[in-house]
Amino acid sequence: MRFAFPIGLALAACGVAQAVLPADAVILPGPAADQLLHQCSRGVPTGYAGHWQPTAEDIAALEAALPVALAAAQPGDASLRGAPHGWRRQYGGFLRGGRRFVYGNFFPRDVGEGRSPDNDWHRAPVMVCDGGHAFFGAEYDVAARRFTRLDFNGFA
């Protein structure tokens, strides 16, 4: 225990920083995260074989890669510029074929305001039918550091 403080100082001095989850993001625990894969107006990942708990570092890598992936998937869609900033997001880890994936559920910041404590976006998946491109899901392969699927809600 005597060396814990000096080691921490040494890591800080080397510029090693631990990722912190943004205020508009949450990593849902296994059973709640599993429910993210049940959406009503967009496709979702298939081949689910269990869950795992992503870290803030996994989420930071996903969010850093998201703007380029969205621009490629929806070229010219100005409403998606700046994502993930401006969106709330719920993340969950799932397994498929022995690989770890993160699924992100993205929705505008004002969605979920005033929800009852029993239906808090920090604890329960937000499901919105239709709503257009402002609501989307993203599947991210953690080891490959790339998106394998982007799905957008439909329009009513």
Image: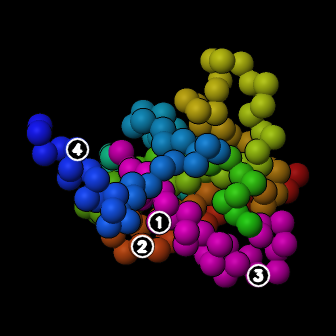
- Disc 4 to disc 3, how far (Cα)? 49 Å
Q: Which mark is residue 61?
A: 1
Q: Are marks 2 and 4 in contact (CB under 8 Å)?
A: no
Q: Amino acid at mark 3?
A: Pro
Q: From this view, report whether residue 138 is shown above or below residue 129.
A: below
Q: Secondary structure at mark 4?
A: helix
> Badge 3: few (under 14), some or many (20 or more) residues near its Cα, within 10 Å?
few
- Disc 3 to disc 2, how far (Cα)? 21 Å
Q: Are marks 3 and 2 in contact (CB under 8 Å)?
A: no
Mark 4 or mark 3, which has the lower sequence index? 4
- Disc 1 to disc 4, how far (Cα)? 28 Å
| Colour scheme of the picture | rainbow
Taking the magenta stretch, the answer to whether it contains residue 90 is no
Q: Amino acid at mark 4?
A: Phe
Q: Nearer the viewer, residue 113 or 13?
A: 13
Q: What residue would you read off at disc 2?
A: 145
The spot of residue 89 in percent (x, y) is: 62, 48
At 51% across and 71% down in the image, what residue appears? 147
Q: Which region of the structure is painted magenta? A: 53-81
Q: Secondary structure at mark 3?
A: loop
Q: Amino acid at mark 1?
A: Ala
Q: Are marks 2 and 1 in contact (CB under 8 Å)?
A: yes
Mark 1 or mark 4, which has the lower sequence index? 4
By secondary structure, the bulk of the magenta-drawn segment is best described as helix
Q: Are marks 3 and 1 in contact (CB under 8 Å)?
A: no
Mark 3 or mark 2, which has the lower sequence index? 3
Q: Are marks 4 and 3 in contact (CB under 8 Å)?
A: no
Q: Nearer the viewer, mark 3 or mark 1?
A: 1
Q: Secondary structure at mark 2?
A: loop
Mark 3 or mark 1, which has the lower sequence index? 1
Q: What residue would you read off at disc 3?
A: 75
At 71% across and 19% down in the image, what residue appears? 116
